[in-house]
Image (cartoon, rainbow, N blue to C red):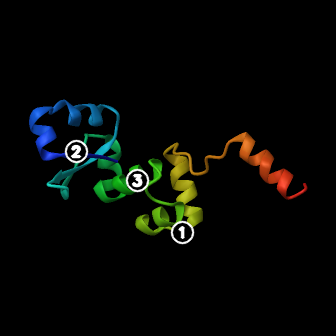
Amino acid sequence: MKTIGIKSLQTNPSLLTHAFEKGEYSLITKHGTPIGIAVGFDSLILDEGLKNYLALKAFENGDLSFSQLANSLGKNKSETMLFLGSLNITFADYSLQEEEETIRLLNL
């Protein structure tokens, strides 16, 4: 999530355009206090609704944990994994190096 001050938007409205083009959502602030959220048009918004869209984007950006996402969507963890798979959203992102280190630590 990108935070954009209202004064920054007045002087450089392309900040919002760039965020929309990247598929990001933005928190709009006035004197450091959140006053709104700006999201670009995305078919996922239409399919899943704004609340679910924001939860999914927050999960993708690392702002929500998997458990928090499941709770936000009103699904159990298995249903959430299937749902994320249907949207081609990665729900576990581990590098090979992390996996090798885990195996080494567990003496497997």
- In the image, residue 66 above or below residue 24: below
Q: Which residue is mark 2?
A: 4
Residue at image position (18%, 53%) is 29
Question: Dot 2, crowdedness within 10 Å: few (<14), some or many (≥20)?
Answer: many
Asked whether, in this view, residue 5 is left or right of residue 108, the answer is: left
Where, quadrant-wise, is the C terminus in this rendering?
bottom right
Q: Could you tell me the amino acid type at mark 2?
A: Ile
- Marks 3, 2: nearer the viewer: 2
Residue at image position (27%, 31%) is 18
Q: Which residue is mark 3?
A: 58
Q: Which disc number belongs to residue 76?
A: 1
For numbered disc 1, what is the local secondary structure? loop
- In the image, residue 96 above or below residue 72: above
Report how far apart the C-alphas of labels 1 and 3 lie in the structure. 18 Å
Q: Could you tell me the amino acid type at mark 3?
A: Ala
Question: Dot 1, crowdedness within 10 Å: few (<14), some or many (≥20)?
Answer: few
For numbered disc 3, what is the local secondary structure? helix
Report how far apart the C-alphas of labels 3 and 2 lie in the structure. 17 Å
Q: Quadrant of residue 44?
A: top left
